[in-house]
Image (cartoon, rainbow, N blue to C red):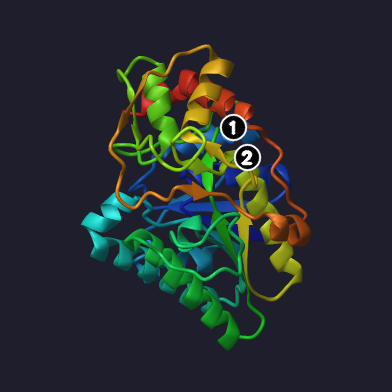
């Protein structure tokens, strides 16, 4: 039996593929290559030391997706495919609603047709909005401050409605916080297309001398050092959380949400200083105006994942910084433009 991983060549998907294979699973990767590169397949194969099947598939094409299920004996799906830039979603909301929602509806329809009823869905802590105070627990009221977040929130609601209406389905909604880090081999890491949306790629470019300084948006928040606080989680912890979620839905029916974070908050300045300490590289920065829509503090309540999934983050902030720098020195500097 094969686990289908959609968007499997992205940052989170590629690391999850490695974790799945190393724990003895057979996987099939599909990706439309709009935000990734086929070279990632080779890097995954280098890490796991075996061939991994990959198909370039556009999930908006329902017939192409149906052909995948015809060709492979798929037992479950981990669904990462989707656009994820907050800024782009504000500028091009229809693109996000069409791509993220319709592709998932297509996937559900085809899964139902082929009697595949187990799905791990890539959601986001964005669904908690900016009104809740951390630690953020799965049963809090949900809202979303931008079109990207609203696609995740809508899809969570669609998935739970679908599970309620169709007996035998099991869906895990994975709400993750701020993934950083890279695989210890240096072969896999975060590979943004275009201008990076996340903080770590910017830090790497400044530390390497490719950029003069890092912009920190806001230095007068009500926090210890004035910068925003985030729950940074190592990408391999995140990958392991998806494997644990897959094991959970094998035994449990229904639609359940799980936070994936460390339960600890670090400020942006904490991250920069930790990076400098463990790498020996300086990261010059400048404080600029606050960015509209930024949440001051975002920290996960991780008790549910620990209790129900038997999962707990094990990597430290120092590990996240070391592994990110190793990836950048090995391959990332050649790839992140």
Q: Report x, y in % for residue 90.
A: 26, 57
Residue 175, compared with residue 10, is above or below; it is below
The x, y position of residue 98, in whole percent, is 30, 67
Is 135 in front, or is 126? 135
In the image: residue 26, left or right of residue 284? right
The residue at which mark 2 appears reads as: 236
Vertical order, 139 against 300 (above or below): below
* Quadrant of the frame with the C terminus: top left
User: What's the CA distance linking mark 1 and mark 2?
Assistant: 7 Å
Q: Residue at left 31%, top 42%? A: 290
Q: How many marks?
A: 2
Name the foreground residue: 63 vs 244. Answer: 244
On the image, the x and y values in percent for residue 216 come to 36, 32
Q: Mark number for residue 163?
A: none
Quadrant assignment for the N terminus: bottom right
Q: Is residue 64 visible?
A: no
| Outermost residue, top side | 280
| Residue density around tag 1, few if under 14, some if 14–19, many if 20 or more, within 10 Å | many
Q: Are marks 1 and 2 in contact (CB under 8 Å)?
A: yes
- Would you say 102 lies left or right of 261 here? left
Of mark 1 and mark 2, the one earlier in the sequence is: 1
């Amino acid at each position: 039996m094969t686990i289908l991983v959609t968007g499997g060549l992205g940052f989170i998907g590629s690391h999850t593929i490695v974790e799945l294979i190393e724990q003895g699973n057979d996987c099939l990767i599909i990706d439309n290559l709009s935000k990734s590169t086929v070279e990632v397949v080779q890097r995954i194969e280098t890490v796991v030391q075996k061939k991994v099947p990959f198909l370039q598939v556009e999930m908006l094409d329902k017939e192409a997706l149906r052909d995948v299920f015809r060709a492979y004996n798929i037992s479950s799906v981990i669904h990462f495919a989707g656009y994820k830039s907050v800024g782009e979603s504000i500028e091009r909301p229809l693109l996000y609603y069409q791509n993220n929602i319709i592709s998932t509806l297509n996937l559900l329809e085809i899964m139902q047709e082929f009697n595949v009823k187990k799905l791990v869905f890539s959601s986001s802590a964005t669904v908690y909005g900016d009104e809740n105070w951390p630690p953020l627990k799965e049963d809090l009221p949900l809202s979303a401050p931008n079109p990207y977040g609203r696609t995740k929130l809508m899809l969570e609601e669609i998935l739970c409605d679908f599970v309620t209406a169709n007996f035998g389905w099991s869906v895990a909604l994975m709400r993750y916080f701020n993934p950083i880090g890279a695989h210890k081999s240096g072969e896999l890491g975060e590979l943004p297309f275009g201008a990076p949306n996340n903080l770590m790629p910017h830090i790497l470019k400044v530390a390497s001398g490719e950029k003069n300084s890092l912009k920190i948006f806001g230095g007068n928040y009500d926090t210890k050092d004035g910068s925003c606080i985030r729950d940074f989680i190592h990408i391999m912890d995140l990958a392991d959380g998806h494997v644990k979620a897959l094991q959970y839905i094998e035994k449990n029916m229904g639609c359940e949400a799980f936070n994936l974070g460390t339960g600890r908050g670090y400020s942006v300045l904490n991250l920069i200083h930790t990076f400098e300490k463990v790498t020996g590289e300086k990261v010059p920065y400048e404080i600029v105006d606050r960015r509209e829509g930024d949440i001051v503090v975002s920290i996960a309540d991780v008790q549910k994942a620990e209790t129900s999934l038997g999962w707990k983050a094990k990597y430290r902030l120092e590990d996240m910084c070391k592994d990110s720098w190793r990836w950048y020195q090995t391959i990332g500097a050649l790839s992140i433009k």
